[in-house]
Image (spheres, helix red, strand yellow):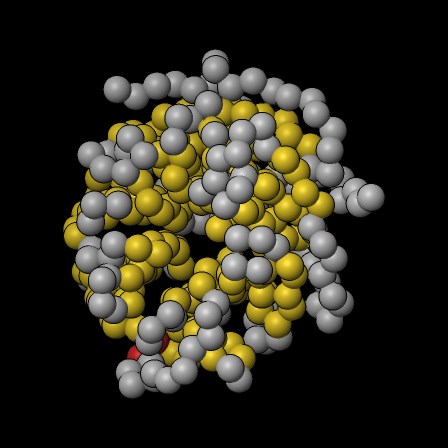
Amino acid sequence: MSTDHTNDAHFLHTRVGLQQVLHVPVAEPRALARIPAREGFLIGDKSGELLELDPLMGTRTVGTFDEEIAALAATRRGARILVVGRSGGWYIVDRKANVMRSGQHPYVAGLYAWSFGQEFALGGRTEDTTGVQILSEGGARASELPSGAVFVPSDEGQDVVWSNPEGLQRLPLNAVEGANGERTAHNLRVSGRHVLGYTPGGVCIWDTAGQPQSVRWRDPVAGDVDPTGSWLAVASRQGELGFTTVTPGVPIERPVVVELEEETPVRALCFSAKRSWLASAADGVRLWTWDSPKRA
């Protein structure tokens, strides 16, 4: 049964490096996505409920699905939403959750979704391979990717990136066949125009030119860079949330650490497309804002 969380959400006034302003008591949130031309977010939970969070207006239930929501993406103004299910389904819906198209995907881990133009990308790993599906009006087109690679929409087209000892490698999607070889241990995630690489001891950030910056962080499981490329949020398996500035060519300082109330792993982090909002999904969805990071 769908639940309207708007009346349950309570505003908080704790003043730390990140200022928590809203806690939406979603029982088991699993996915977050920003709406590119708006301030809001999409939330998907383990029960299959899809919600929209507006930082000023609160939340509303969009609809429910028959499987856990593992990844989300929205078109520029949120008129179309891609909902990726953990059990193998995908659904393109409107803002009232009316299904416009649906299908199946083979991925069992590392699921992610992106919107670019009028198309969506859905990627992940099977038991044996890495791949991506491009979902367009003409249908779904599947491509196998090099091991450890992720799909990256770009101004020039559709690219694929992966990390090897020489650095971050990038090729057009239609040119990656046979591009295998040695890989680094980075678990890659795309964050807007940046690529994040997680290792047990830290995070590496590559910008659009492929230039790396690193920061130490224990057991990172989620991260995001804001759309301006100025801020990094990262979370640990132990339930810690970190926040710091990013400046090209300048070493990244140790993130300000926010201890969450419960030691619950953070499943997802997402900056808003506009203004200073950060959403985190752990024991509910928490909304944060900031003026500038405070360091001891």
Q: Residue drawn 66% across and 38% down?
A: 258
Residue at (65, 61) in percent of width and height: 215
Taking the spot 76% from the left edge, 44% from the top edge, the residue there is 293
In the rendered image, the vertical position of residue 89 relative to residue 122, given as above or below:
above
**Count of all numbered marks drawn on residues in the image:** 0
Q: Quadrant of the N terminus?
A: top left
Determine which quarter of the picture holds residue 256: top right
x and y percent of residue 79 in the render?
37, 42
User: Can you tell which quarter of the image residue 44 is in?
Assistant: top left
Q: Position of residue 246 (x, y in %)?
A: 69, 59
Horizontally, residue 163 falls left or right of residue 97, namely: right
**Is 60 on the left-hand or right-hand side of 252?**
left
> Relative to 293, does residue 19 appear above or below in the rendering?
above
- The residue at the far top in this view is 7
Q: Is residue 272 visible?
A: no
Q: Nearer the viewer, residue 45 or 59?
A: 45
List x then y, in percent, for residue 110. 35, 56
- The vertical placement of 77 against 190, above or below, is above
Q: 118 or 231, which is in the foreground?
A: 231
Q: Quadrant of the C terminus?
A: top right
